[in-house]
Amino acid sequence: MSEGSGGPTEDMVRRLLQLNPQLRGDGQSTRDVVSHMQDQFNAGQQKQAAPAPAKGGLSLAEEIERLKRAYGERTAGLRDEQAHAKTERAGLAAQRKSVAEQACARVIDALLASDPDLTADATLAQLDAHAAFLKRIGFSQQKLLAAEKARKGGKR
């Protein structure tokens, strides 16, 4: 076999036998070892050339078709799950907004009951101390003023 074909050459086998003399069988010549190695190499090449059937005895085409169907079914299921999750996220976002609006309304009610003009130092200190929370629930002085106007308008 030639060097270009990928099989073991006589020179390669000689070097191998120098490194490991036990590779040589009883009285085998270098040519015998080369011939034996080339036969093994060719047998391996033939096994690679003929594709083995995939698991379950399916041909490659059948296996690919089976995998395509399974992939399609699984991705369709995932799309359904994603759509469901998107709907759930939207519902949770609406609930979160509602909870924030309710909390903001209660803060405004408490402020209007205790210090509607926001003049007490203790009130201003509490607003500063809880500024991050108040921002998260959407509290603003504009909302406070609108609630105060609405309350005064309703008392008439």
Image (tube, rainbow, N blue to C red):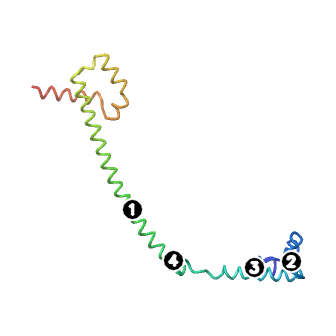
Question: How far apart in space, not on screen, are marks 1 and 2 (Cα)?
Answer: 62 Å
Q: What is the total number of numbered labels drawn onto the structure image?
A: 4
Q: Position of residue 78 (x, y in %)?
A: 40, 62
Task: Label 3: state its secondary structure.
Answer: helix
Mark 1 or mark 2, earlier in chain: 2
At a point 39% along the width and 64% down the height, the residue shown is 77
Compared across the picture, whether 145 is left or right of 126 comes to left
Mark 2 or mark 3, earlier in chain: 2
Question: How far apart in space, not on screen, are marks 4 and 3 (Cα)?
Answer: 29 Å
Q: Say if 60 sits above or below 97 in the image.
A: below
Q: Residue 25's quadrant in the figure?
A: bottom right
Q: Check disc 3 and report the residue beneath it.
A: 41
Q: Check disc 1 and report the residue beneath it.
A: 79
Mark 4 or mark 3, earlier in chain: 3
Q: Check disc 4 and report the residue beneath it.
A: 63
Q: Check disc 2 and report the residue beneath it.
A: 24
Compared across the picture, whether 141 is left or right of 39 comes to left
Question: How far apart in space, not on screen, are marks 2 and 3 (Cα)?
Answer: 17 Å
Inspect the image, locate mark 2, and give the three-letter code of the amino acid beneath it: Arg
Question: How far apart in space, not on screen, are marks 4 and 2 (Cα)?
Answer: 44 Å
Of residues 70 and 90, which is closer to you in this image? 70
Question: How far apart in space, not on screen, are marks 1 and 3 (Cα)?
Answer: 49 Å
How crowded pointer 2 is (Cα within 10 Å; few <14, some 14-19, many 20+) is rated as some
Mark 4 or mark 2, earlier in chain: 2
Inspect the image, locate mark 3, and give the three-letter code of the amino acid beneath it: Phe
How crowded pointer 1 is (Cα within 10 Å; few <14, some 14-19, many 20+) is rated as few
How crowded pointer 4 is (Cα within 10 Å; few <14, some 14-19, many 20+) is rated as some
